[in-house]
Image (cartoon, rainbow, N blue to C red):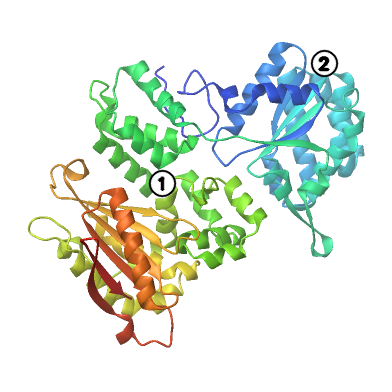
Amino acid sequence: MQRFFNNAGPIKPQLHYHLPRLQRLDWDEVQQLIREQRYFVLHAPRQTGKTSTLLAMMQALNGCGDYACAYANIEGAQAARGDATQGIPAACEAMVDAIARDTHHPDLLAWYRTNKPETQPQHLLTRLLTQWAATATQPTVLLLDEVDALVGDTLISLLRQIRAGYAQRPESFPQSIVLCGVRDVRDYRLEQDGAQVITGGSAFNIKAKSLRMGNFTEAETRALWLQHTEATGQRFDEAIFPELWEDSRGQPWLVNALGYEVTWENRAARDRSQPIGLIDYQAARERLIQSRATHLDQLSDKLKEPRVHRVLQGLLTGEEDSLDKLTMDDQQYVEDLGLIVTRPGVRISNRIYQEIIPRELSWIAQTRIPNQEPAWYIDPDHRLNMPKLLAAFQQFFREHSDSWSEGFDYKEAAPQLLMQAFLQRIINGGGRLTREYGLGRKRTDLLIEWPLDPEQGLYGPLQRVVIELKLLRGKLDRVIQTGLAQTLDYCRRVGADEAHLVIFNRNPKVSWKKKIWHRPASLEGFSIGVWGA
């Protein structure tokens, strides 16, 4: 069977293009931790390849003959919603089934069926793992997946029962246990009776190390896609690969989902004699974004969490004072979710997430903006008439900003989000809107790329327009002076031939007559339109 890009579930090497699964982490370090009888954490964002890597670890450990290793996904215990009397037995069921399957130990299953009725849930897990270790012919290793899906007393009990047996390893308890999930154990926040909050770190203080799986490198991203060329002979335009890297930054699901979209969902590309061009890739990218696929939907759901809100609010506005509200734990948590990277500076992880996040936050506004059609703003030479478009936005903002802003969860970023929704409504007619954010820069950079030849689309000549968004803080003249320099710098960086600076005045005491204005400006011979809103 011809292999394909995997966009759902663990890798099956015979079906999917894939990179060596144990290449995703430092396998020598993992083996050393197991030899040293350590308990440790492996974590990474959703759909990064954690399960595929755990299964490969299990196969390698069982294959070497030195260990009896089992992999168990205990997500099903989440249904107990923190009730340990139901959650722990559910987790134990998953574990005993996995041990019987992966280590060929059917006697343990019989033992469990006999002893479960008379064992209290707060001891059941410890007794099960003790019995396994005591009757196995090799030292035992347990890989537990989706641990952080558990909540409340179920998670507390699981961590504490593992900790209770730790001192008896390896003769009477697993030599090594790996906890795997999206978050590090320090971010397991556990509610107990009386609203007392403890952290996973205090409930599991035997953790030796936390290992984080990263994304593909640029070279690995390219190598994965070229497996399709090697298998089918179908070639990719070289211009695709820089775009693929910026869009995904190696996020494994995005790399695979884009590959599947461009090689299969595009029906014309199923003819493997046809090369895949940049315009095919760009169309696939837009379809993926519009699809609101499960991965992207889960990402969007995280935007509602207060800890995520605090971090992304600052990124979307670029305001320095947002930095003061951040804690190290919040920032690390959002990075662990895969939404941001922190080095060399804090930014949203990749270009597709930069698209998804504001689109999701402003989706209702974008779909309900009335009486706006792209054709109204297209000149006879097919250029976007930006002064006309921005003047229309000023009027729209004046009429609707108060009511629309109340509908945004991210109210501090409402002006920027509302403008992006307005532009997206127009640009969806055939162009592309790219966003750039950064903490502490006090601005949001937008780049419009509009095709001047409808037949060639984004593959032909483009009108490139920069729009810089700023909130008015302090004296207007100083904000304009700083904004002009920033706008010109961004124009030069992206090769834009037209630029506008939009300054939002959020002072409710200032009348709309004073907020709405337009003036031409220039810097170093480059004309820049300056707009108030």
SS at mark 1 in the image: helix
The label on residue 147 is none
The label on residue 352 is 1
Q: Tell me if mark 1 has few (under 14), some (14-19) or many (20+) residues whose alpha carbon lies within 10 angstroms of its own.
A: many
- Under mark 2, the amino acid is Gln
User: To which quarter of the image does residue 445 belong?
Assistant: bottom left
Viewer-side residue, 163 vs 221: 221
The answer to the question of whether label 1 and label 2 lie on touching residues, with beta carbons closer than 8 A, is no
Q: Is residue 60 visible?
A: yes
Q: Tell me if mark 2 has few (under 14), some (14-19) or many (20+) residues whose alpha carbon lies within 10 angstroms of its own.
A: some
Quarter of the C terminus within the rendering: bottom left
Number of numbered markers: 2
Q: Is residue 371 visible?
A: no
Q: Is residue 289 left or right of residue 62?
A: left
User: To which quarter of the image does residue 234 belong?
Assistant: top left
Q: Is residue 2 left or right of residue 176?
A: left
Q: What residue is shown at x 37% (from left), y 77% (from top)?
A: 476
Viewer-side residue, 43 vs 346: 346
Q: What residue is shown at x 42% (from left), y 51% (from top)?
A: 354
- Percent x, y of residue 269: 27, 29
- Percent x, y of residue 266: 29, 34
Residue behind mark 2 = 138
